[in-house]
Amino acid sequence: MKRYTHVKILLAAGLLCLTLGGCATPRETLYDALGGSAGIDQITRALIVQIGNAPDIRPFFEETDLERFQSKLNEQLCQVSGGPCDYTGDPMDKVHAGMDITEANFNRLVELLIDAMDETGIPHPIQNQLLARLAPLRAEML
Ligand code: HEM
């Protein structure tokens, strides 16, 4: 009889663990939630298509080497989401200096990033976590 009580307690503890989001497993990073390297690559690919279809943002990228842009953005998103990467691109203030980026331009690019994440199936709470980590960069660009 006592043995069964123990089993019940273990089951209850197990259930609690599951409900609270897993006890023994290591915490998933934002990088993992974005689908790791392949997930981020899909997002930036979709973003570049979105940029190409946005008449207000496309002109900024007219002279840009899009392959480099995508690879540096992949590194940056990997790094800010806690993935195993170091950003090797140029500093954000230098890259965007002289482009006269307005608040509206910035917000529009964020919208395109959200569209790209919607397209690749990233849940909204995860999207918000990434956007929150990118928000501090805003001051370096405007
Ligand atoms: C959170 C917002 C943003 C992030 C994280 C971001 C990130 C980046 C990164 C990583 C690069 C590549 C740097 C390199 O080549 O070393 C880049 C380049 C670039 N970004 Fe942004 N960016 C943001 C906002 C914007 C906005 C709002 C605009 C304009 C509307 C913009 C326009 C550009 C352009 C045109 C380039 C290419 C520059 C070139 O051709 O060398 N970015 N950005």
Image (spheres, rainbow, N blue to C red):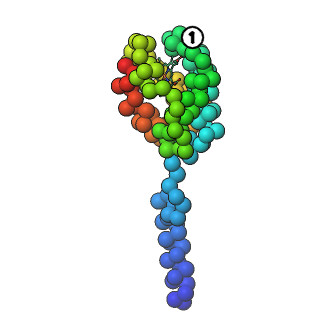
Residue at image location 57% in from the left, 33% down from the top: 74
| Dot 1 alpha-carbon crowd within 10 angstroms: few under 14, some 14 to 19, many 20 or more | few
Q: Which is more toward the observer, 46 or 98?
A: 98
x then y, percent, for residue 87? 51, 34
* Dot 1 amino acid type: Glu
Residue at image location 42% in from the left, 21% down from the top: 94
Q: Inspect this view and state whether residue 58 appears.
A: no
x then y, percent, for residue 47? 57, 25
x then y, percent, for residue 20? 47, 59
Q: Secondary structure at mark 1?
A: loop
> Above or below — where is 131 with respect to 8?
above
Residue at image location 43% in from the left, 25% down from the top: 92
x then y, percent, for residue 43? 59, 31
Number of marks in picture:
1
> Above or below — where is 139 with respect to 101?
below
| Quadrant in which residue 42 is drawn | top right
> Above or below — where is 78 with respect to 104?
below
Q: Which is more toward the observer, 5 or 86?
A: 86
For disc 1, the marked residue is 62
Residue at image location 59% in from the left, 36% down from the top: 40
